[in-house]
Image: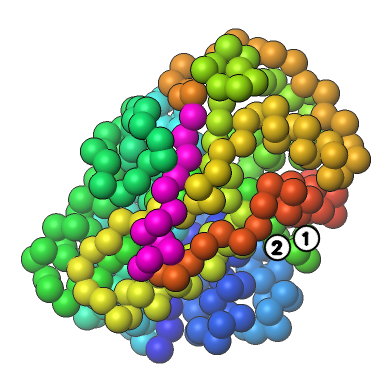
Amino acid sequence: MSVLLTGAAGYVGSHACVELLNQGYSIVSADNYVNSSPVALERVRQITGRDFPAYETDLRDEEKLRAIFRAHKIESVIHFAGLKAVGESVKKPLEYYDNNLYGSIVLLKIMREFGVKSMIFSSSATVYGAATKMPLDEKMPLGCVNPYGWTKFAIEQLLRDLCLADPDFSAVLLRYFNPVGSHKSGLIGDNPSGIPNNLIPYVTRVAVGELERLPVFGNDYNTPDGTPLRDYIHVCDLARGHAAAMAYAAAHKGCEAINLGTGKASSVLDVIHTFERVNGVPIPHFIAPRRAGDADESWSSTEKAERLLGWKAEKGLDDMLRDAWRWQRQNPKGYHA
C-alpha cells in the first residue's frame, strides 16, 4: 500500500517525502516539474536511503494518472500540486483555475474510480482573506483576495461536499502559514525560479550575493516596528504535520480544516535582524512602497492541530533562518548547479 504525493518534488512536497519515508511509508511521486526539479527527488533518496517510483505527469492528464493508480495500490493521497504565486494568479486567473481546480477534480475522479477515499490537502491561510482578528482559527469566516486563494477555497469546498456525499471519505485540509527553512542536510530546500516572491528566499539570495538588496515593502504598518507580522513555520515541522494528518485521516472519516503554524508572529525586520545574528551575514535592505493587499498581521491559532493531531511546531525562527542559509550556501544556484 502506497501514499501518492502530487507535487512531490516541490518545496513542501520534498520535505514531506523525507518525513514519510523515514516513518516507514511507501510513497509514489507525481509531478510535472513546472515549478520544481526531479533533482529534489534524487536528494530525497540520498537523505533517506530509500527508493520510490516517480512519474512525470500533469494531473489533468487522466490516462497518465489512471496508469499510476493501476500500477500501484494507492491507499491515500497528499495533494501538493498546484500553481502558487499570488501575483501571477491575478494576471493569469484562467490558468490558475484550470491547473489547480480542474487538476484536483481529475485527481478526485480517478481516486473515486479506484476506491481511494483519503486525501490530505495542501491548503493555505489565504482562505482567511482579509481577516483582521488574530489569531486566525478554523471557525472564522472564509474569503479570499486573489485567484490563488480562491482556488484553495474552491478545492476545500469540493472536499467538504465529497465528505458529505460519501460518509467513508476522509479529508484533512491543512492551512499553512509561511513555510521557511530546509532539511538539516542542506540537500533540499526552497528553490523558486526568478526573483523570489517570498521574504526568506529573497533574504538568502541577497546573502549569497545573487541579489543586491532586499526591498522591505512598507514601514508604516500598525505593528511595533512598522513592518508586517507573519507566522513563519519550519518546513520540517510542516512535514511532520502531514504525517500526523495521515494518521488522523486513517482513524477518522469526514472533513477537518486544520491550521499549521507556530502561533507566533515575526516582523520583516525581525527576520532580517535574526538572520544577520544567527548567520553572521549582513542583509542590505531598503524601504520600498507598500504592496497592495498586504495585511498588518497574520498568525495562527494552533489549538486544533494540538488537540486533533497531537502536533505542535518545535523549531523557532533561529532554526528556520539557520537552515535556510545552509541550503542556499550549499546550493547557490539551487537545483540547477
Give the class, few, some or many, for how many residues have Cα within 10 Å of label 2's Cα (few <14, many ≥20): many
Q: Which one is nearer the viewer's eye here, 281 or 86? A: 281
Residue located at (61% from left, 18% from top): 226
Residue located at (33% from left, 37% from top): 128
Q: Inspect the magenta stretch and tell me whether residue 304 lies in it.
A: yes
> For numbered disc 1, what is the local secondary structure?
loop
Judged left or right of residue 93, residue 52 is: right
- Label 2 belongs to which residue? 183
Q: CA distance from mark 1 to mark 2?
A: 6 Å
Q: State which quarter of the image contains the N terminus.
A: bottom left
Q: Inspect the magenta stretch and tell me whether residue 188 lies in it.
A: no
Judged left or right of residue 275, residue 114 is: left
Would you say residue 15 is visible in this rendering? yes
> For numbered disc 2, what is the local secondary structure?
loop
Residue located at (40% from left, 35% from top): 134
**In the displayed structure, would residue 96 be above or below residue 220?**
below
What amino acid is at disc 1?
Answer: Gly
Would you say residue 331 is visible in this rendering? no
Q: Which residues are magenta?
A: 297-308
- Label 1 belongs to which residue? 186
What amino acid is at disc 2?
Answer: His
Judged left or right of residue 324, residue 165 is: left
Residue 3 x %, y %: 43, 78
**In the displayed structure, would residue 26 be above or below residue 283?**
below
Residue located at (30% from left, 38% from top): 150
